[in-house]
Amino acid sequence: MARMFPLPHSLLRRWPGQQAHCFTALSNQPALEAAVADLKQQLRAAGQRGPADLALVFCSTAYATDLQRLLPLLRDAIPSHNWIGCAGGGVVGTDSGGQPHELEHQPGISVSLFELPGSELQLFHLEAGGLPDLDGPSQQWVDWVGAQPEDAHSMLLFIDPGCPAINDLISGLDYAYPQAAKVGGIAGQHNASHGSLLLNDRVVEGAVGCLISGAWRIEPVVAQGCRPIGPVFEVEKAERNVVQRLSDGHNQGTPVACLQAILEGLNPQERELVRHSLFLGVAKSSFQLSSSDTPDDSAFLVRNLIGVDPRTGSVAVGERLRVGQRVQFQLRDANASRQEQRQLLSLQRRRQPEPLAALLFACLGRGEGLYGQPDGDVNACRELFAQVPVAGAFCNGEIGPVAGATHLHGYTASWGFLVPNTPPAVSDMPSGATAS
């Protein structure tokens, strides 16, 4: 069952001449009341006075036992018409000095207040279970969600880790709201008896979201943190998620045999990475590659290799594959992650150099464990966007689009940049894209 919450304030467009604002605060006070007082003081010092249109709240699971008290305390202290967020394995936020940080393995609460003139917001709550049929009409999904898709171009989406059929839920929301770019993540796990999602004054399970229309939109950037090795293969034989044979031109072999051939051209460091950081990229843009086509790395959805059959040379992948799909082995390390993210963020800066804010939903496997130092992802953002406030959470899975469809990712940084809803200049658009 879906619940739509009436939003009389946020559904009214304010005059577009008003200026948009983003106010941020970050606290690592271990006591909940002290953290809320700290957040209130920071926001007041930053100039926040009247009620915001939207408050985004992310807190670490260190506050799990107090989670049900968090929103009532925040709402009493900080004015905003709408509240949404989740608990995470860590918190991303921007402090009173304007510096973004990633708080891992410690208490942390991040609050971001947005004033978005000319925008419309629709918050929704989806209770777990009972999804509409993906083969039925899309209107069933729209009715279930309760938020209208007209002119909706962006969606924030947070899902409780106990929610069943998460991939089907994401596919259904794509089906019902195909024009809305979706970013978010799977909330953090904890041992308390309630969920991990925050909506207005409650803690809930299932999924929560915010559909955005009007003058502001979210532009997604999905950094999967891998680099390709070896050629692009074509799947010749597969059964569900088990790949049995691959081809490279006229050459065919088992996935294990193909990987062994690739290993011969790798250096010792890369061979060591293969032992524990090997993935498979699955092309999502098209099937068979013609002689005139060039593989597009950004269209590869990186998936885990979850098993090897040494007798047959087959591999099991965390994605169902079909004959004709293109795949490529991938390696993940800190340098590959930095390089890929820098390239993607540079492209985003050329498209929209001055976002109002950046939202980051990062895998628990990133952070200091990947980079060997704190603030690795937010520092990459600040190198290109010197003043942009950053907020978000470390997630159990990240939500973002690849090749026109929304997917659940792992080991990924799923970014959402809040920008004016104006089409990019034609000269800034990727090759082959057209302005609408």
Image (cartoon, rainbow, N blue to C red):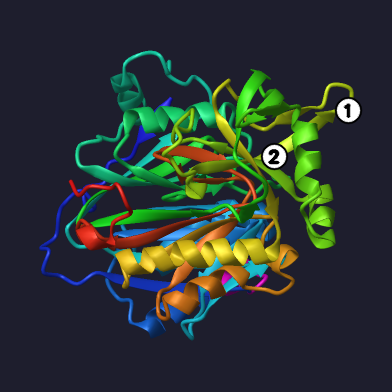
Element type where label 1 sits in the image: loop
Quarter the N terminus occupies: top left
Q: Does residue 266 appear left or right of residue 434 in this picture?
A: right
The residue labelled by disc 1 is 310
Q: Does residue 237 appear left or right of residue 77 in this picture?
A: right
Across and down, in percent, residue 350 comes to: 33, 68
Question: 10 Å neighbourhood of mark 2: few (<14), some, or many (≥20)?
Answer: some
In front of the other: 252 or 180: 252
Quadrant of res 181: top left
Q: Residue at x 37, y 73 (%)?
A: 23
Q: Is residue 32 above or below residue 307?
A: below
Q: State the extent of the magenta-drawn residues as a range.
A: 29-36
Residue 414 visible in this rendered orientation of the protein:
yes
Across and down, in percent, residue 404 comes to: 39, 39
Q: Residue at x 84, y 48 (%)?
A: 275
The residue labelled by disc 2 is 304
Element type where label 2 sits in the image: strand
